[in-house]
Amino acid sequence: MTVLPSSSLQAAAPWLRADWRPDSGQVLAVRGGRPLEGVYPISGAKNAILPLMISALLTPHLVTLRNVPASLDVAVLSALLRRLGTEMHWSMTASGLSVTLSADRLQPGSIDGELVSRMRASVLLLGALLARCGEARLPMPGGDAIGLRGIDFHLAGLRAMGAEIELASGLIEARAPQGLTGAEILLPLPSVGATENLMLAAVAASGTTVIRNAAREPEIVDLAHCLGAMGAKIVGAGSHVLTIEGGAALTGAVHDVVPDRIELGTLACVAAVTDGEILLRHGRAAHLGAALSAFQAAGVDLCEEADGLRARRAPGGLAGIDVVTQPYPGFATDLQAPTMALLTLAKGASAITETLFEQRFLHVGELRRMGADIAVHGRTARVRGVAGLHGATVACTDVRAAAALVIAGLAADGETVLTGLDHLDRGYDRIVDKLAACGADIVRR
Ligand code: UD1
């Protein structure tokens, strides 16, 4: 197989071209004040696609993923996987972007440090490569600047499965010359990444692995479904205890990526803050967890329909609420910044407490430049609703901060200019085109 992006694919996702490089010169100009209306198709989940693509390394057979989001993270991971000898074929159909991966000639030694440093999820290569090749050598991964984000749970779990791991000069060197063996693992926190890494390792280990205090996010369930379609035996996905019987010979699979619940929540905020009405096609209310009732209390009406969720502002208007981020099904930390943008315009006061990441208020300063009234005390941001926001030049500092600034810009008077667009592109599939189709005045220049 070769990488042959069709012209339509290049138009939708230019970064999937092998020679694409980020263009830091670009900015996004948003003119707010228009109620957005229409249909917004929710893409496959940003946080599901990365472990799903890496799961293809576990088998020499073909794995096809459909409903792939055309995000910059996908491009970075694609480049990483190509360096490892994975072949990929992309196609664009009316139902979305698909990729078929073939990892029958894997070269575990050749990992690109610059690419790893751009994406924290690349740490998931550890579990998959150890499982398939018995070795992995990886620079310490990077990612968003939202906190310390250790990988100690990942390493402890893999060590419990028999891996020898050394850390030196910014490198992780892991070996399992005799193969991995099943183990009982208790995670100190229900870490999403650690749960995924250990699932990937455990399906190829000999014997049974039990992961206690496992993460329960829909993306974990989606990974379990894909691995199950490949022949893995996993019980308990979506609960606190995952039991994985390892050692089954894995086949290929065809899998549809779960819709993105964070894109769903972000767009619900857009509909409400602009006083518009948007059908969020493919959106699943149940995947919002605690955010569903929080949105309703804040005046974001979400009504389930046959092919998605209809989002609009409640007749009583937006109201301040208190929010505490928690692992799923608690209020998602990834919806904290978008929700804060919404609450800047709600009647009354809100308190937003971030419990997962210590530096996840980088958007506060930028929202203030647009007229928001927000004060941060430790891990809590107190937001007093204002009558209106005004356009300003603001910088995106992480993917969800970028989404918050888009929401604020769509509601603000005048023009908002966003810089640092790589952050937005990391996680949001064609957001500019999809918002423009709902009537937004939004353009890259
Ligand atoms: C994933 C999501 C991210 C989301 C986060 C929490 C992907 C690609 N990213 O990130 O969008 O915000 O879940 O829902 O899916 N921790 C440790 N040691 C570890 C692992 C985690 O201390 O070994 C800590 C982290 O610093 C953090 C907390 O545990 O404070 C939760 O992190 P985790 O669930 O692992 O987040 P990610 O998988 O990195």
Image (cartoon, rainbow, N blue to C red):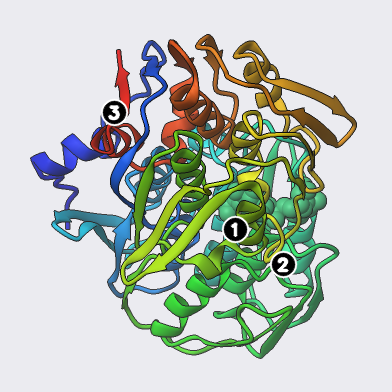
| C-alpha separation, residue under disc 1 versus residue under disc 3 | 26 Å
Q: Earlier in the sequence, mark 2 or mark 1?
A: 1
Q: Are marks 2 and 1 in contact (CB under 8 Å)?
A: yes
Tag 2: amino acid: Leu
Judging by the rendered image, the residue that carries numbered circle 1 is 126
Q: Earlier in the sequence, mark 2 or mark 3?
A: 3
Q: Secondary structure at mark 3?
A: loop
Out of 77 and 443, give the one closest to the viewer: 443
For image coordinates 84% across by 26% down, the residue present is 376
| C-alpha separation, residue under disc 2 versus residue under disc 1 | 9 Å
For image coordinates 39% across by 14% down, the residue present is 27
At label 1, counting other C-alpha atoms closer than 10 Å, the crowd grade (few under 14, some 14-19, many 20 or more) is many
Out of 402 and 229, give the one closest to the viewer: 402
State left or right for residue 93 relative to residue 311: left
Q: Nearer the viewer, mark 1 or mark 3?
A: 3
Q: Earlier in the sequence, mark 1 or mark 3?
A: 3
Tag 1: amino acid: Leu
Judging by the rendered image, the residue that carries numbered circle 3 is 20
Percent position of residue 377, x then y: 90, 29
The answer to whether any part of residue 342 appears in the image is: yes
Q: Secondary structure at mark 2?
A: helix
Relative to residue 25, is residue 57 depicted above or below? below
Percent position of residue 241, x then y: 73, 82
State left or right for residue 258 relative to residue 381: left
Image quadrant holding the C terminus, namely top left
Q: Secondary structure at mark 1?
A: helix
The answer to whether any part of residue 173 appears in the image is: no
Judging by the rendered image, the residue that carries numbered circle 2 is 158
